[in-house]
Amino acid sequence: MSALVAAGGVPGLWTLADGQKLQAPDIEYGKLSPTLIVLGAAAVGVVLEAFLPRRSRHVAQVFLALLGLAAAFAAVVGLAASGAGSTKAQIAGMGALAVDGPALFLQGTILLVGIVGVITFAERRLEPRAHGAPVDSFAAQPASVPGGEGEQMAVKAGWTTSEVFPLLLFAVGGMLLFPAANDLLLLFIALEVFSLPLYLLCALARRRRLLSQEAAVKYFLLGAFSSAFLLFGTALLYGYAGTVSYSGIARVVSGADATTDPVLAQTTGNDALLLIGGALVVMGLLFKVGAVPFHMWTPDVYQGAPTPVTGFMAAATKVAAFGALLRLLYVVLPGLRWDWRPVMWGVAILTMLAGAVVAITQTDIKRLLAYSSIAHAGFLLVGTIATSKDGISSVLFYLGAYSFVTLGAFSVVTLVRDAGGEATHLSKWAGLGRRSPLLAGVFAVFLLAFAGIPLTSGFAGKFAVFKAAAEGGAGALVVVGVIASAIAAFFYLRVIVLMFFSEPRADGPSVAVPSVLTSSAIAVGVVVTIVLGVAPQYFLELAGHAGVFVR
Amino acid sequence: MESLIGVLVGAPLLGAAVLLCGGKALDRAGHWLGTLLAAASFVVGAVLFFGMLGRAGDDRAMHSHLWSWIPVDGFRADVAFQLDQLSMTFVLLITGVGTLIHVYSIGYMEHDERRRRFFGYLNLFLAAMLLLVLADNFLLLYVGWEGVGLASYLLIGFWQHKPSAATAAKKAFLVNRVGDAGLAIAIFLMFTTFGSFAFAPVLANAGDASEGKLTAIGLMLLLAACGKSAQVPLQSWLGDAMEGPTPVSALIHAATMVTAGVYLITRSGAIFNGAPDAQLAVVVVGAVTLLFGAIVGCAKDDIKKALAGSTMSQIGYMILAAGLGPVGYAFAIMHLVTHGFFKAGLFLGAGSVMHGMNDEVDMRRYGGLRKYMPVTFVTFGLGYLAIIGFPGLSGFFSKDQIIEAAFGKGGTQGWILGGVALLGAAITAYYMTRVMIMTFFGEERWRTERTPSPDRPDVEPAASVRGEHAEPHPHESPGVMTIPMIVLAIGSVAAGAVFKLGDSFVNWLEPVTQFEHGHPPVSATVVTTATIVALVIGVGAAWLQYGRRPVPAVAPRGNLLTRAARRDLLQDDFNHAVLVTGGTHLTRSLVYTDNKVVDGAVNGTAAAFGGLSGRLRRVQNGFARTYAVSMFGGAAVLIAATLLMRAV
């Protein structure tokens, strides 16, 4: 803008000086189509919400969301097939976005997770019908006071919050940008684009609304705090390098780019700015992946949020955030490897151990899975720290495997219910294997996958990250990882023992019979878990081909 | 020609697959299919045999490579066959006797509703046994070795509704595991010593290996042979194995499978030749078992168990001969073949007797049966004459040569071994005469009732008293059963003379097993005379005891040795005292250690983590401000750590 002002006489804000033409940004729409499709569908969803009658919104929104996500996934596959992930990887969108192997792989994963997420959001068979209308897991009228008159009226009218589908689409859109962001500002914008809808979604539980709202507020406050870290770090890095683009910062770090903006002459090349700024940006991302000591929101939010949201969030956020973390560490900061590696070692060790140890004494299945997700963030950090091509691909594979197990596990949680809604207290799960052997068996498969037992995807993923880390010289870290896995196995197996070897309680929960939606979400989880466990080779190779970042 | 070798194994294997996987539709014709495929295998064997006779001695071995089983760098396991004179001998014995027993079983198992399955198992056995003797490497031999073990297990426990049969099958399986472990270790040692386990490289290079290694391999092979051939100390399963149907006892537990140990030692001759200590162990095992089985055979009233003791004893002879080295290999195999004929014949005869006596096995319930079962009597009698070594019959030639070779070992060892073999011959004559008299001569004891007396409360009431069957009406068996018995009787009579004539059998095997003439301290005539004297003493003693006096329908209490022999010379008591009690104590102490030490450590660790978890959990107090402080503190620490890393 300053250039414009300097060039012409006194141009207004909306006018250009004579003879000047605004350079139209060069946007590769084809390459960015997955994100554009999803965001477009989300916008259409908002319009539908405004114009369609309440009765027909649910079906229309579900259809639109699935269509948008499927089209975006097709676009990702098309891009990958045309070589955009390997030979023709490039920086697009005026240097703001990378279209390369890891980005496409993660976008594909996020879109699949989103599709399964929409399916679980759409389930309307589990809650008892409210005055004749089928309802889902979301509040009838989120703006009403919990327990108040407004809520009662909304329930009576059979309302549901069909806005969750556009919200999910916006979140997915942000998540698609997040691992592809090649610019710190875009990284921040993507973070906010996917975080804000998630905060809202967390507050929308139909049952236990106060818990849900408390979770949303906590998530929002702490999320805003961590965004501040990220933004401050961005500012410091700009001060250091004079640019917010990844490749620009990387060039300054490696000393390849000696030209400095005179305005920033005093700060450019100041290593303290680089180190502190880099650390702050990384911390912003560590918050999103739920690494110690930025993990404390996880159990509260996982427990309070509506369970379908928890499943979607636990899977998709982790994929997006690890994608962004990988790109930051491998593209921007490889020159600083000897500075951040020891610190990340410490974070990984703390995360694995704290997640596994604290999970031992949890009594609520959702909190248990939350701590489990913290431990898994630690395992993923082990692969991230490997700083090798194998490290990248092993993390990509692990993310794909982990997200489907998580979706499946939380879907199972939605089915075990008593009069108060979902029966999440572990003591109520005693003897579930005798009442519903199929459901308990499926959950046992997921737990075994979380524990990393061979023939499940969890084993293949864990083996891949540990192997990459060991070959990258982080043997000690692998030892800690194996110990943490052993501790974690205890609480996973404890649930299996509880389900199959305890007497069922007389007042125990019943297992709801889901519609084809949740059933298929669970079935997808089981199939992916077993296929990736029994025959991981093809997918490992796929992740292996996708393991190179464009710079 | 080579491709026919695969057919030998393939035909019965196909039969097993079809009969075991096929449904009830095969019930009516299944036994014929099984018999036909066994006969087909025999015909192929005969064709190959005549083809082999047409070639010169050193050129007779044939090889057939089917496929590479495990082709890995530095490790080759092939599915390949070797058919030489030694294998050929076994092939003819297995398929010949096997086919006869298939035919016999058609009659014997006629009323069993699971007859199709029975023939499936028999075919499976034939396939496994042929694989064992045709393999050209020890690994494939091991496959056959385990295969026959499996078939034996399935057939001993064929009447699994009887707890005694199920237990006997389990016992046989477990005892055989010990021997199988020996074979596995022997193969491991071969691989580390020779880098291969194919016969050709192992046996050709045996001379270059150190004696210690050869001794170790030899002892492990001997352990394997002890398990499969029921030699002391792994003999305890054979007597119980008689719980299986009698054709099984005849084929597997008399004629073929139990002789696999003799085959193994003979086949590995080159290894034993370089390991005198292992050879000594072999002859000691053979000599001990020879007497052990004979003594047990004297005390048993169950006709099949008496014959089982006899089998053990006769295999003892073969092992003894095989332990003598090139002097004895050919004689061991020759006795193996003749024994295959007469022992299979004796078992089939016993089966025929049981068939006519409502499945009664107690010889004290027999007597005077020669009138009712003339064919069985004559064929059994010829088998009897053959086994005791009646001059001119097959056992005479084969056993006499082993005794001669035992004396030829030289020195004190020679005298001891020769003496034991001679004593064994006398005892053999004794117990076989006893069986013969108790079964076919004397009073018709089945007509008298028998009930447990206060004196002998352990006596089981006769089957008719138990109310299971009516009083028996002894009768001759149908032709389908007697014809195999007749064929085997002919073999029992003639085989020895044919083999002995011009040393044809020794010359036939010589290219494979080598042959040396022994040097007995006394002339062959003296040894033969002594053998005949021993035979007469044995027969006479039995006649004095059982022929002159009536046989009591309830066995007398007997002296200490008799009672011990009745209990199989306390083999099970020994195993129980040493292995079971010892094993129980071992597991108890291990369980104690596991509970106190291992579990203590594990539970302590778990408790420690649980306590830690409980403390850490309290940090999660639910206040967003606390969480924010923790993030802020964490951020400060991480930044400080990052800067510190740069500083150092």
Image (spheres, coloured by chain):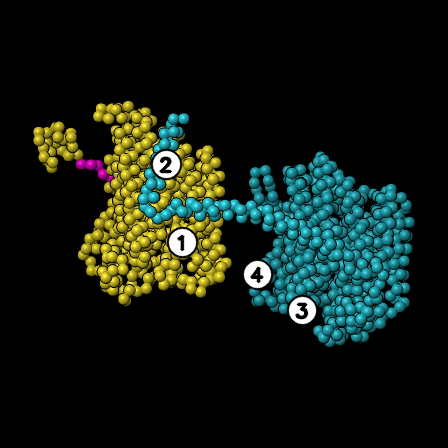
Kindly identify which chain the residue marked by label 2 belongs to.
A
Q: Which sits in the foreground, B634 or A440?
A: B634
Residue A405 in the image: state x and y as whole percent: 40, 50
Q: Chain B is shown in which shade?
A: cyan
> In the rendered structure, the residue with mark 3 lies on which chain?
B
Q: Is residue A19 above or below residue B375?
A: above
The disc placed on residue B110 is 3
In-image side of A548 versus A132 (left or right) = right
Quarter of the picture containing the C terminus of chain A is top left
Q: Which residue is mark 4?
A: B21
Q: Distance between the Cα atoms at labels 3 and 1?
A: 66 Å
Graded by Cα atoms within 10 Å as few (under 14), some (14 to 19) or many (20 or more), the crowding at tag 2 reads many
For the residues labelled 1 and 4, the Cα–Cα distance comes to 51 Å
SS of the residue under disc 3: loop
The stretch of residues the image draws in magenta is A24-28
Q: Is residue A463 visible?
A: no
Residue topped by disc 1: A364
Label 1 element class: loop
- Label 2 belongs to which residue? A548
Which quadrant is the N terminus of chain A positioned in?
top left
Give the vertical position of B10 relative to B22 (above or below).
above
Q: Amino acid at mark 2?
A: Val
Q: Are tags 4 and 3 found on a single chain?
A: yes
Q: Quadrant of residue B40?
A: bottom right
Give the distance between the C-alpha atoms of the residues marked 1 and 2, in whole angstroms. Answer: 40 Å
Look at the picture and state if B576 lies above or below A373.
below
Mark 4 in CB contact with mark 3 (< 8 angstroms)? no
Q: Nearer the viewer, residue B619 or B600?
A: B619
Q: Chain of mark 4?
A: B
